[in-house]
Amino acid sequence: MKAWDAIVIGGGHNGLVNACYLQRAGLDVLVLEKNDWVGGAATSRELTPGFLYSNCSYVCSLFRPEIMRDLELPRFGLQVISYEGGAVFTRDGDYLANYRDHDAHRREFARFSKRDAEAYDRYSRDVTRQCRFIQPLLMRTAPDPTSFKPRDLGELLYLGKKFVGLSAEEMALTLRFWTMSISDFLDEYFETDVIKANFALSGIIGTALGPMSPGTAYVLLHHYMGEVDGSVGAWGYARGGMGAVTKALAASFKASGGTIRTGAEVDHVLIKKGKAKGVVLAGGEEIYGKLVVSNADVKRTFLKLVEEKELPEIFLRRVRNFKIRGSSGKVNIALDSLPEFPALPKDSPVYRADMHFTDSIERMERAYDDWKAGRWSADPFLDMMIPTTLDPTMAPPGKHFMSCFVQYAPPKIDGRDWTDADRDGFAESVISQIAQYSPGFRDRIVHMEVRTPREIEAEVGLTEGNIFQGELTFDQLLFNRPVPGYAQYRSPIGGLYMCGSSTHPGGGVMGAPGRNAAAEILRDLAKPTLHMSPAHDVI
Amino acid sequence: MTSSELNWDAIVIGGGHNGLVAAAMLAKSGRRVLLLEAGNEVGGAARTEEFAPGFRVSAVAHLLNRLHPDVVKTLELERHGLTIERGNFVPSVALSKNGPLTLHGAYGEVLTGASSAEQSAWKQLRAQLLRYAGVLKPFLSRRAPDLGNMSLAEMTGLGQTALALKRLGKEDMRDFLRVLLMNVYDLLDEQLSDDRLKGLLAFDATLGSHLGPRSPTSLLGLYYRLAGEIGGLAGAQVQPKGGMGAVVAAIRAAAEKAGVSIRHASPVARVIVEKGRAVGVVTQSGETLRAKTVVSAINPATTILDLVGPREVDTGFVRKVRNIRMKGDAAKLHLALDRPPQFPGVDAAGHKGRLVIAPSPDHVERAFNPSKYGAFSPEPVMEITLPSLVDASLAPCGACVLSAVVQYAPYALKEGWTAGKPLFLKAIMAQLEIYAPGIGATVRHAELLTPADIEARYRMPGHWHHGELQADQMLMSRPVSGWSGYDTPLEGLFLAGAGSHPGGGISGAPGLNAARRIIAMRA
């Protein structure tokens, strides 16, 4: 019976990145995907004729350029079209636009407040400096601070040096930044509600926290990282939707000799004498592998795919305590014509940008209060865009695809499961918000796909519908991610590795977890990693 | 030479407990010290005051749980009248409609009113919390590490902390690092199941800060509490006989014994700055007093922005000072009652303790929500003491004093506190009525101090800790980053109040550490 060199469970972007790097190192790799298509949460599917949806993730912002280059994704068809910044509509009929050009952006701020326009320079400088410390950590394995192995000590030293390289002032700012709320942070710079709301949204996307929660300033950085790179591929639409990213990854993988099996759901990992020997599919088929890498989140991997008796008690306890509460949903809409927003001039570049309707931090925070109380937000925060304004391939001529990321949506409603009626109520909160700013919007809707955390978990397999495979709070970052003692992509079971967003550095279509996990695996196999670019320091 | 030109070694601004501690320490080191107090009495928010004829109460702080042992020892407070005995420790009672749950001894050495499973879970959690708080405890009595420019002593201090961490053992250290910045809500959920116990802990973690139990970093509030000790035991609490004013009286006696000159009713108008150096103060009455060192034990923002003036320091520093968050959320309630109230199910010892209304962590979180938007909690949470049951002299015969710290009462109430105060009092009384039925009918006089009142009466702008006590305003970021070591950009000017590391509470630690710094610098 054939034994693969490596079996990757789950064909999401991190699983594919991991598989690509392993295959290119000379391993014979098999990727198993439960759905009939690959991509995980980075897929494009045609659910109604002629319209291609970016079903879950919707923007290419964080994907590491080093990985794109290593795996030659452009050669395998990935094209990223950068888009204009964005806009926040205000309730008085105006809007605040975000332009990619710093000076244009500053002028737009001045329209609302001269003081804020001046503060913007200071703000950009401070945030960029913060990225200088955090950005290089993305593509490195987090050290174990309790270990005295030379490698962990070396890595700690690296962190220390990086940290000491900052001035005392920056150090203090870094420490504050990690523990501040985005709201308090912005209060130190800006006075205008809509300007603060405009920045705050990056602090809450995908997070079960409100803008007033300490720690959200860090989440802002997590999202900012793609932007500061300034490289091609940062902040753009993938032509053909987000599925194009995983399609290119799959093509790159296959071109180097890798094998993908779709419709192959793994039931459990085959473990003998504490070592992973392969997997058993839902139908009972056994597949053998010298090592197994799980792209599934840490809860799914160790509470569903591995038997309890195989794991140490303390590890299980920590996995059970891992926080992975879903906080967002998605509404994808097929439109028979481009919606109009009377606040915008005709042909405004904002049509080709992301749009928001939450014009104050207070509204954002109140939306979070609903989540805490176990219900979807009555006045949700939307990150809405119409990718077809830049990529007409996603809809029939003249028609459009609209993607609405929606926050907040709890994993359970008042402690019970979501029902179809709940889902419809959730969708209505989204539609009615858009309709307030776009008369006639409802009449343009041809088809809709509504995804609450229930649908996201059922289809993509993300526990509780958490898009980051685990919350991005400090107790779950760096050496604490996913659980203390196992932040190096290994697990208590020999030959079983993790490569999903549950691991450092976390979620977003970034690819770093998949790549870093491959580096650790190859280290264990004593194989060279010359085909992996090191993280580049860009700032 | 007239008296006004008389030169002092040090002038201390503000006669709160930290000012008194700093002054006493400096005087003991041989310095000639003048302490200037704006009010007619020293003690600041730690006074005992009469709020209704014959009824006296601790003004703001009403429980002693963290007076630093170095302060007690160095100033020989026991010789000056402070007595703390193990027998004085009072319990914490979590009130509930389903009957109370009580933490006895030092923060629940014994837990009663809970299931046996909960008792053993609590035993474990309590031990863990005390262990972790113990790692952080040494930070209380020294300067926060100056990351950019560490002295050998500071390096050694950090090294000791690393060693303490290592002593925890590998798994415990991992847990320590995981939970350090976590929220209290999730941690309680992981380990406990009784809502009353969880509610009490959630309340303690967030007391005095603009955080709810679900806010990340809220667990630090609990660590801060448990890093404090009294009578040698972490987490213990006493109701001082004579109220908090008796504690202040002991510190004052120590200060006077050491030779500190204390002047009442002498508010300072400004700090005199000459060539970038603080050289004295001018009082509001126009008197000029010169000194080698000026120590301010009042709010850091007031000190820098009002007494020094933004012109004397660089804009970056001024900006940081302006950005210190101080949106106090705690109000203080004093009731003069005809007779002691009865909290059903609570025994006599419990009535002498701390009675907490915080029935569940969700309840505390819901109480927090409105404060984010400038509204008070419609169902506030609170800790109640009945000081006259411990010291009968505080109330007329047969009558009773109730003292409560109540949350959440945002400093900047949208409707303004003039309009809001009677409504908030009504909401508080409604909660009290639930847990002590009939109490409303026995109220002879009620005094509610909102954060605005506390500011006006005790000169504590915005916040009783002189600045929000949250992770980003702690340690090397307190009062502002770069200046956490009690010194300021102005030579000769030092900060010694609760706005400095380690922060608020009747600990005396900021005053103690500031004085030690000044002595070490030979300033």
Image: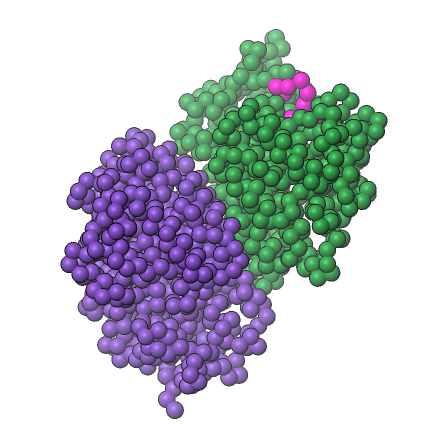
Chain colours: A purple, B green
> Would you say A414 lies left or right of A511 here?
right
> Would you say B394 lies left or right of B460 here?
right
Furthest-left residue in view? A397
Q: Main secondary structure of the magenta part?
A: loop
Point out residue B86 in the picture as x, y percentages from the top left corner: 80, 44
The one nearer the camera, B158 or A248, is A248
The one nearer the camera, A113 or A424, is A424
Q: Which residues are magenta?
A: B36-48
Would you identify the image quadrant in which residue B52 lies? Answer: top right
Point out residue A261 in the picture as x, y percentages from the top left corner: 33, 79
Point out residue A25 in the picture as x, y percentages from the top left corner: 31, 76
> Would you say A537 lies left or right of A284 here?
left
Would you identify the image quadrant in which residue B465 lies? Answer: top right
Decide whether residue A273 is among the magenta residues.
Answer: no
- A96 up-or-down from A306: above or below: above
Residue at the image position 45 percent from the left and 65 percent from the top: A463
Residue A31 visible at all: no
- B124 up-or-down from B498: above or below: below
The one nearer the camera, B40 or A456, is A456
